[in-house]
Image (spheres, rainbow, N blue to C red):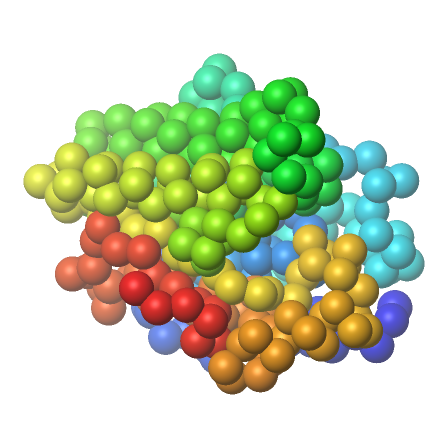
Amino acid sequence: MTTQASEFVERALVSRGVWAPELKGKTAIVTGAGRLRSIGRPIALELARQGVNVVLTGTGRSPDRYPPDEQEVGWRDIESVADEVRAAGAEALAFVSDVSDPDAVEEMIRRAVDRFGRLDILVNNAGAARGDDRVPVVDLDIDTWRTVIDVNLNGTFLACRAAARHLIAQGEGGSIINISSIASRLAGASAAAYSASKAGINALSHALALELAPHQIRVNAVLPGVIDTARMDDLGREDRWRATLQRIPLGTAGTGMEIAYLCTYLCSDMGAWITGQDLTVDGGMTWH
Protein backbone atom coordinates (compact mmCIF):
# COMPACT_ATOMS: atom_id res chain seq x y z
CA MET A 1 0.00 0.00 0.00
CA THR A 2 1.26 3.51 -0.77
CA THR A 3 2.47 5.67 2.11
CA GLN A 4 -0.42 8.08 1.56
CA ALA A 5 -3.02 5.31 1.63
CA SER A 6 -1.41 3.70 4.68
CA GLU A 7 -1.51 7.00 6.59
CA PHE A 8 -5.18 7.44 5.66
CA VAL A 9 -6.08 3.98 6.94
CA GLU A 10 -4.17 4.58 10.17
CA ARG A 11 -6.07 7.83 10.77
CA ALA A 12 -9.40 6.13 10.16
CA LEU A 13 -8.58 3.46 12.73
CA VAL A 14 -7.64 5.94 15.46
CA SER A 15 -10.13 5.57 18.30
CA ARG A 16 -11.06 8.12 20.93
CA GLY A 17 -12.92 5.38 22.76
CA VAL A 18 -16.52 5.59 23.87
CA TRP A 19 -17.50 9.24 24.22
CA ALA A 20 -21.21 8.94 23.39
CA PRO A 21 -22.32 5.91 25.43
CA GLU A 22 -26.00 6.78 25.00
CA LEU A 23 -25.72 5.58 21.39
CA LYS A 24 -25.02 1.97 22.40
CA GLY A 25 -27.61 -0.40 20.96
CA LYS A 26 -29.00 2.08 18.44
CA THR A 27 -29.15 1.33 14.71
CA ALA A 28 -27.74 3.50 11.92
CA ILE A 29 -27.86 3.29 8.15
CA VAL A 30 -24.83 4.75 6.38
CA THR A 31 -25.14 4.85 2.59
CA GLY A 32 -22.16 5.00 0.26
CA ALA A 33 -19.87 3.43 2.86
CA GLY A 34 -17.67 1.08 0.86
CA ARG A 35 -14.59 3.08 -0.10
CA LEU A 36 -11.28 2.63 1.71
CA ARG A 37 -10.39 6.35 1.57
CA SER A 38 -13.76 7.98 2.02
CA ILE A 39 -16.17 9.78 4.31
CA GLY A 40 -18.71 6.98 4.72
CA ARG A 41 -16.26 4.43 6.14
CA PRO A 42 -15.00 6.63 9.03
CA ILE A 43 -18.58 7.61 9.88
CA ALA A 44 -19.59 3.96 10.10
CA LEU A 45 -16.55 3.07 12.19
CA GLU A 46 -16.94 5.93 14.67
CA LEU A 47 -20.61 5.09 15.20
CA ALA A 48 -19.62 1.45 15.70
CA ARG A 49 -17.09 2.46 18.36
CA GLN A 50 -19.98 4.01 20.28
CA GLY A 51 -21.86 0.70 20.12
CA VAL A 52 -24.16 1.53 17.21
CA ASN A 53 -25.24 -1.34 14.95
CA VAL A 54 -24.51 -0.23 11.40
CA VAL A 55 -26.25 -0.99 8.11
CA LEU A 56 -23.85 -0.31 5.23
CA THR A 57 -24.88 0.14 1.62
CA GLY A 58 -22.83 0.57 -1.53
CA THR A 59 -23.17 0.41 -5.28
CA GLY A 60 -21.59 -2.99 -5.78
CA ARG A 61 -18.57 -1.70 -7.71
CA SER A 62 -16.70 -4.23 -9.77
CA PRO A 63 -13.25 -4.93 -8.23
CA ASP A 64 -11.59 -3.91 -11.50
CA ARG A 65 -12.85 -0.37 -10.81
CA TYR A 66 -11.18 -0.18 -7.40
CA PRO A 67 -8.26 2.27 -7.14
CA PRO A 68 -4.77 0.69 -6.86
CA ASP A 69 -4.55 1.01 -3.07
CA GLU A 70 -7.80 -0.91 -2.61
CA GLN A 71 -6.74 -3.62 -5.05
CA GLU A 72 -3.38 -3.91 -3.31
CA VAL A 73 -4.92 -4.78 0.07
CA GLY A 74 -7.69 -7.00 -1.31
CA TRP A 75 -10.41 -4.54 -0.39
CA ARG A 76 -13.99 -5.90 -0.54
CA ASP A 77 -15.97 -2.67 -0.47
CA ILE A 78 -18.80 -2.65 2.09
CA GLU A 79 -17.90 -6.17 3.25
CA SER A 80 -14.49 -4.93 4.40
CA VAL A 81 -16.11 -2.06 6.28
CA ALA A 82 -18.60 -4.49 7.82
CA ASP A 83 -15.67 -6.54 9.14
CA GLU A 84 -14.19 -3.39 10.68
CA VAL A 85 -17.52 -2.51 12.31
CA ARG A 86 -17.66 -5.97 13.90
CA ALA A 87 -14.05 -5.65 15.03
CA ALA A 88 -15.06 -2.41 16.78
CA GLY A 89 -17.61 -4.39 18.80
CA ALA A 90 -20.83 -3.57 16.93
CA GLU A 91 -23.06 -5.57 14.58
CA ALA A 92 -23.08 -4.92 10.84
CA LEU A 93 -25.32 -5.61 7.86
CA ALA A 94 -23.97 -4.86 4.38
CA PHE A 95 -25.76 -5.04 1.05
CA VAL A 96 -25.82 -3.38 -2.36
CA SER A 97 -28.55 -0.77 -2.82
CA ASP A 98 -29.39 1.92 -5.38
CA VAL A 99 -30.42 5.06 -3.51
CA SER A 100 -32.04 6.50 -6.64
CA ASP A 101 -34.51 3.57 -6.81
CA PRO A 102 -37.59 4.12 -4.59
CA ASP A 103 -38.23 0.40 -4.19
CA ALA A 104 -34.59 -0.28 -3.26
CA VAL A 105 -34.70 2.46 -0.63
CA GLU A 106 -37.86 1.06 0.94
CA GLU A 107 -36.21 -2.36 0.98
CA MET A 108 -33.14 -0.82 2.66
CA ILE A 109 -35.25 0.46 5.56
CA ARG A 110 -37.13 -2.84 5.84
CA ARG A 111 -33.94 -4.90 5.95
CA ALA A 112 -32.41 -2.65 8.59
CA VAL A 113 -35.45 -2.92 10.85
CA ASP A 114 -35.85 -6.66 10.25
CA ARG A 115 -32.23 -7.24 11.24
CA PHE A 116 -31.93 -4.93 14.24
CA GLY A 117 -35.51 -4.32 15.30
CA ARG A 118 -35.33 -0.53 15.08
CA LEU A 119 -33.88 2.46 13.25
CA ASP A 120 -32.44 5.53 14.96
CA ILE A 121 -29.95 7.18 12.61
CA LEU A 122 -29.72 7.74 8.87
CA VAL A 123 -26.57 9.14 7.27
CA ASN A 124 -27.11 9.92 3.60
CA ASN A 125 -23.58 9.79 2.24
CA ALA A 126 -24.00 8.09 -1.15
CA GLY A 127 -22.97 10.30 -4.05
CA ALA A 128 -22.59 10.14 -7.81
CA ALA A 129 -19.07 9.46 -9.06
CA ARG A 130 -17.03 12.54 -9.83
CA GLY A 131 -16.13 12.81 -13.51
CA ASP A 132 -18.18 13.53 -16.63
CA ASP A 133 -20.28 16.18 -14.88
CA ARG A 134 -17.27 18.47 -14.33
CA VAL A 135 -17.77 20.48 -17.54
CA PRO A 136 -19.37 23.83 -18.39
CA VAL A 137 -23.17 23.82 -18.44
CA VAL A 138 -23.22 24.38 -22.20
CA ASP A 139 -21.34 21.09 -22.62
CA LEU A 140 -23.15 19.13 -19.89
CA ASP A 141 -24.93 16.03 -21.16
CA ILE A 142 -28.53 15.79 -19.95
CA ASP A 143 -28.13 12.17 -18.87
CA THR A 144 -25.08 13.08 -16.81
CA TRP A 145 -27.04 15.92 -15.17
CA ARG A 146 -29.89 13.52 -14.38
CA THR A 147 -27.54 10.93 -12.89
CA VAL A 148 -26.00 13.44 -10.48
CA ILE A 149 -29.41 14.80 -9.44
CA ASP A 150 -30.91 11.30 -9.16
CA VAL A 151 -28.17 9.95 -6.92
CA ASN A 152 -27.28 13.01 -4.84
CA LEU A 153 -30.59 14.84 -4.41
CA ASN A 154 -33.33 12.36 -5.28
CA GLY A 155 -31.50 9.59 -3.42
CA THR A 156 -31.30 11.75 -0.31
CA PHE A 157 -34.98 12.63 -0.61
CA LEU A 158 -36.04 9.00 -1.00
CA ALA A 159 -33.99 7.80 1.95
CA CYS A 160 -35.15 10.70 4.15
CA ARG A 161 -38.78 10.04 3.26
CA ALA A 162 -38.60 6.30 3.94
CA ALA A 163 -36.61 6.70 7.16
CA ALA A 164 -38.81 9.54 8.44
CA ARG A 165 -41.94 7.47 7.97
CA HIS A 166 -40.47 4.69 10.07
CA LEU A 167 -39.06 7.02 12.73
CA ILE A 168 -42.44 8.75 13.13
CA ALA A 169 -44.18 5.40 13.53
CA GLN A 170 -41.50 4.20 15.95
CA GLY A 171 -42.19 7.27 18.08
CA GLU A 172 -38.78 7.61 19.76
CA GLY A 173 -37.19 10.48 17.81
CA GLY A 174 -34.06 10.05 15.76
CA SER A 175 -31.39 11.78 13.72
CA ILE A 176 -30.97 12.23 9.97
CA ILE A 177 -27.71 13.59 8.61
CA ASN A 178 -27.36 14.51 4.95
CA ILE A 179 -23.83 14.84 3.62
CA SER A 180 -23.75 17.93 1.43
CA SER A 181 -20.69 19.96 0.38
CA ILE A 182 -19.26 23.46 0.47
CA ALA A 183 -19.92 23.35 -3.28
CA SER A 184 -23.52 24.09 -2.33
CA ARG A 185 -22.30 27.56 -1.35
CA LEU A 186 -19.34 28.14 -3.66
CA ALA A 187 -20.99 26.71 -6.80
CA GLY A 188 -17.85 26.89 -8.90
CA ALA A 189 -17.58 26.80 -12.68
CA SER A 190 -17.84 23.37 -14.29
CA ALA A 191 -19.55 21.93 -11.22
CA ALA A 192 -23.15 22.99 -11.81
CA ALA A 193 -24.79 19.57 -11.45
CA TYR A 194 -22.91 18.71 -8.28
CA SER A 195 -23.39 22.14 -6.73
CA ALA A 196 -27.09 22.24 -7.57
CA SER A 197 -27.65 18.77 -6.11
CA LYS A 198 -25.90 19.71 -2.88
CA ALA A 199 -27.70 23.04 -2.56
CA GLY A 200 -30.93 21.09 -2.91
CA ILE A 201 -29.84 18.81 -0.08
CA ASN A 202 -29.38 21.84 2.19
CA ALA A 203 -32.87 23.13 1.46
CA LEU A 204 -34.41 19.68 1.79
CA SER A 205 -32.70 19.20 5.16
CA HIS A 206 -34.02 22.48 6.55
CA ALA A 207 -37.60 21.89 5.39
CA LEU A 208 -37.56 18.34 6.72
CA ALA A 209 -36.14 19.50 10.05
CA LEU A 210 -39.13 21.80 10.54
CA GLU A 211 -41.58 19.07 9.57
CA LEU A 212 -40.05 16.44 11.84
CA ALA A 213 -39.27 18.59 14.88
CA PRO A 214 -42.63 17.79 16.53
CA HIS A 215 -41.57 14.13 16.43
CA GLN A 216 -38.16 14.90 18.01
CA ILE A 217 -36.43 13.82 14.80
CA ARG A 218 -33.47 16.06 14.05
CA VAL A 219 -32.24 16.72 10.51
CA ASN A 220 -28.97 18.44 9.65
CA ALA A 221 -26.75 18.85 6.60
CA VAL A 222 -22.98 18.46 6.98
CA LEU A 223 -20.90 20.33 4.39
CA PRO A 224 -17.38 18.90 3.99
CA GLY A 225 -14.70 21.00 2.36
CA VAL A 226 -11.58 19.53 0.75
CA ILE A 227 -11.37 16.04 2.25
CA ASP A 228 -8.46 13.82 1.31
CA THR A 229 -10.36 10.87 -0.17
CA ALA A 230 -10.28 8.81 -3.35
CA ARG A 231 -12.71 11.30 -4.93
CA MET A 232 -9.88 13.83 -5.01
CA ASP A 233 -7.37 11.58 -6.76
CA ASP A 234 -8.00 13.20 -10.14
CA LEU A 235 -6.25 16.31 -8.79
CA GLY A 236 -3.08 14.33 -8.16
CA ARG A 237 -0.94 15.35 -5.20
CA GLU A 238 1.37 17.81 -6.93
CA ASP A 239 0.77 21.36 -8.23
CA ARG A 240 -3.05 21.24 -8.44
CA TRP A 241 -3.31 19.70 -5.01
CA ARG A 242 -0.94 22.24 -3.45
CA ALA A 243 -2.85 25.08 -5.10
CA THR A 244 -6.08 23.71 -3.62
CA LEU A 245 -4.57 23.54 -0.15
CA GLN A 246 -3.47 27.16 -0.41
CA ARG A 247 -7.15 28.16 -0.49
CA ILE A 248 -7.71 26.60 2.93
CA PRO A 249 -6.94 28.98 5.83
CA LEU A 250 -5.80 26.12 8.10
CA GLY A 251 -3.51 24.95 5.31
CA THR A 252 -4.37 21.26 5.16
CA ALA A 253 -7.06 19.01 3.74
CA GLY A 254 -9.48 17.34 6.10
CA THR A 255 -9.91 13.61 6.61
CA GLY A 256 -13.04 11.54 6.86
CA MET A 257 -12.60 11.43 10.63
CA GLU A 258 -13.37 15.15 10.96
CA ILE A 259 -16.73 14.46 9.34
CA ALA A 260 -17.24 11.29 11.39
CA TYR A 261 -16.74 13.08 14.70
CA LEU A 262 -19.30 15.75 13.83
CA CYS A 263 -21.86 13.21 12.60
CA THR A 264 -21.48 11.17 15.78
CA TYR A 265 -21.87 14.31 17.90
CA LEU A 266 -25.06 15.26 16.04
CA CYS A 267 -26.51 11.78 16.60
CA SER A 268 -25.70 11.83 20.31
CA ASP A 269 -27.40 13.59 23.21
CA MET A 270 -24.75 16.31 22.88
CA GLY A 271 -26.45 17.36 19.64
CA ALA A 272 -29.98 17.07 20.99
CA TRP A 273 -30.78 20.76 20.42
CA ILE A 274 -29.29 21.03 16.93
CA THR A 275 -31.56 20.69 13.92
CA GLY A 276 -32.15 22.40 10.58
CA GLN A 277 -28.51 23.45 10.29
CA ASP A 278 -25.91 23.50 7.48
CA LEU A 279 -22.71 22.66 9.36
CA THR A 280 -19.47 23.30 7.50
CA VAL A 281 -16.26 21.35 8.09
CA ASP A 282 -13.78 22.98 5.73
CA GLY A 283 -10.73 24.41 7.50
CA GLY A 284 -12.13 27.92 7.16
CA MET A 285 -12.75 28.06 3.39
CA THR A 286 -16.32 29.37 3.63
CA TRP A 287 -18.54 31.19 6.07
CA HIS A 288 -22.29 31.61 6.33
**Would you say 227 lies left or right of 219 here?**
right
Tell me the residue at 80%/64% (across/down). Answer: 236
- In x, y percent, where is residue 31? 53, 41
Q: What residue lies at 35% left-to-right and 26% top-to-bottom?
A: 162
Which of the image's four quarters has the N terminus? bottom right
Q: Residue furthest left?
A: 214
Q: Nearer the viewer, residue 55 or 237?
A: 237
Up-down: is 199 above or below 60?
A: below
* Rendered location of residue 148, percent (x, y): 57, 32
The image quadrant that residue 238 belongs to is bottom right
Vertical relation: 106 (above or below) 245 = above
Please identify the residue farthest to the bottom as the structure is shown: 250
Residue at position x 35%, y 51% in the image: 221
Outermost front residue: 138
The image shows residue 176 at horizontal and vertical percentages of 33, 45
Point out residue 167 in the picture as x, y percentages from the top left corner. 25, 35
- Asked whether 279 or 41 is in front, the reply is 279
The residue closer to the viewer here, 46 or 153, is: 153
Residue 142 seen anywhere in this rendered image of the structure: yes
Can residue 94 be seen from the camera position used here? no
